[in-house]
Image (cartoon, grey):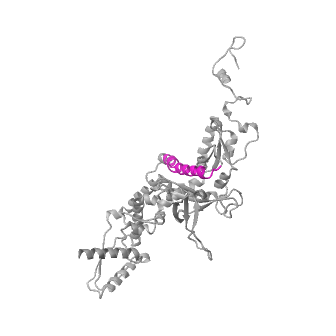
Amino acid sequence: MGILSGLGSAFRAVANAVDPGAPRDMSDPKYWADFGGRMSLAGVEVNDSNASQLGAVQAVRHGLTSAMKSLPASVYRRGANGARQALPDHPVTRLIAGRPNDRQTPAELIGELAWNVSFYRNSYCAILPPGDPRASEFYAVGGLDWLHPRRLALVERGLDGRLYYTFNPPATIVQGAQLKQTTYREDELWHIRSNPLREDGLLGEPIFHSARNVFARAIAVHEYGDIWFANNGQSGGTIEHPGTFKDKADRQEFLENWRAAGTGRNRHKDRLLTHGVKYNPIKVTNSEAQLLETEDAADTAVFGLWSYPPHRASRLKRATNNNIEQQSLEFVVGCLAPLAIEIEQAIERDLLLDNENGALFFEFNFAGLLRGDLLNRYRAYLIGRQGEWLSANDILRWENMSPRTDPGGDEYKNPLTKDSAGGARGDDEAGDQSGSSPNEDGNDDQD
């Protein structure tokens, strides 16, 4: 009997595996993996779609992409003694900061790359050769065609030792077109990875996988709140019915009519109880009354995944003028800078093909974040002028203003250290003013 029972269980397992219409256990992680998601301890599925619907995630997405899009970027050449020279006409500068392809602006491309690296921990662009119809016609240097990470179907290593990436066609259906998968060799694709990496080291692990339970808790809390408010902010109750129902269908119809009369647009309407029916509402518990605090804690945990300051999402509960300034600095140092470095290094690795001697590098200029703060920006310029590492024309160029044409526009000497004749004071002349020195007659100089 035991052998027959074991064989029966084995046959049922095989049948369930073969028959896609057979019922499956939703608590099995493989069930959700088939749909691109994973079951969490909170009992909700977590994938890129429902994780993206969280308000905290949307706030992080807007904050990160908006900041990255505002940063000027260029290829630079290293010179002697730490000097650098911007190369605005370099092909890579034109691609990233000028025209990446025939349909996207630099802001669109940088925004998508930044979010793909932060959320999916992978971003992809097909490298288009010059003359490709998808490349920009404005610059004859080829282009970058952005590919959504969700389209990636397979990554495998070929017999030649190279990696090959296969992408599904876009979800949009072009009428009359036969869209097929497209495979790119690793030197035909620009792939940016972010930590943590998967075990094979080929792809980054999406944040909604590595932090599944954090997103699941936030999703569960917000879904609970939505359902709670949909039910008139109440936790239901019990219905005392003195009679009996004809069958289960009759009882189910009564309950559905009752619920429909108290939810949606009917939630504030009066209801008539007939046939001796009595309704006993369940009072709101303390945990339900603290729903907003629970949601706030769940969102704060989501912000922490990116080291994103809550005040940038208008969460000002613990914000003051002093700590907001410090958090803004931490946002640049701990959140934006690592993201920018990942993109910069990927550009230098895959796109700067004329960099055999390592003299070229790509960099985002974080001074662009000061554009919205006029007073602090002018204070920084003043410090640079007084410290003699900024000229007037340097500042004018950063302000998108025409440079001065007189020779003084490119001088780095502090204007406050010049004498009345316009000449710069040297150290000896400065020393003459701080003390006295004998003249030819042996007397002190007098002005």
Q: Residue 268 location in percent, x, y?
A: 40, 75
Question: Where does residue 123 sit, x and y in percent of width and height?
Answer: 55, 58
Q: In this view, does 178 lie to the left or right of 422?
A: left
Q: Residue 323 magenta-drawn? A: no
Seen at 54% across and 65% down, the residue is: 151
- Name the residue rendered at 44%, 66% in the picture: 37
Horizontal side, residue 361 vs residue 326: left or right: right
Magenta region = 325-353
351 vs 333, nearest the viewer: 351
Prevalent SS, magenta region: helix
| Residue nearest the viewer, comparing 217 with 276 | 217
Relative to 421, 313 lies left or right: left
Instruction: Reply above or below: 35 against 205.
Output: below
Does residue 341 show up magenta in the picture?
yes
- The answer to whether residue 267 is visible is no
Q: Which residue lies furthest to the front in this view?
A: 159
Horizontal and vertical percent position of residue 187: 60, 56
Q: Could you tell whether 30 is left or right of 393 in the image?
A: left
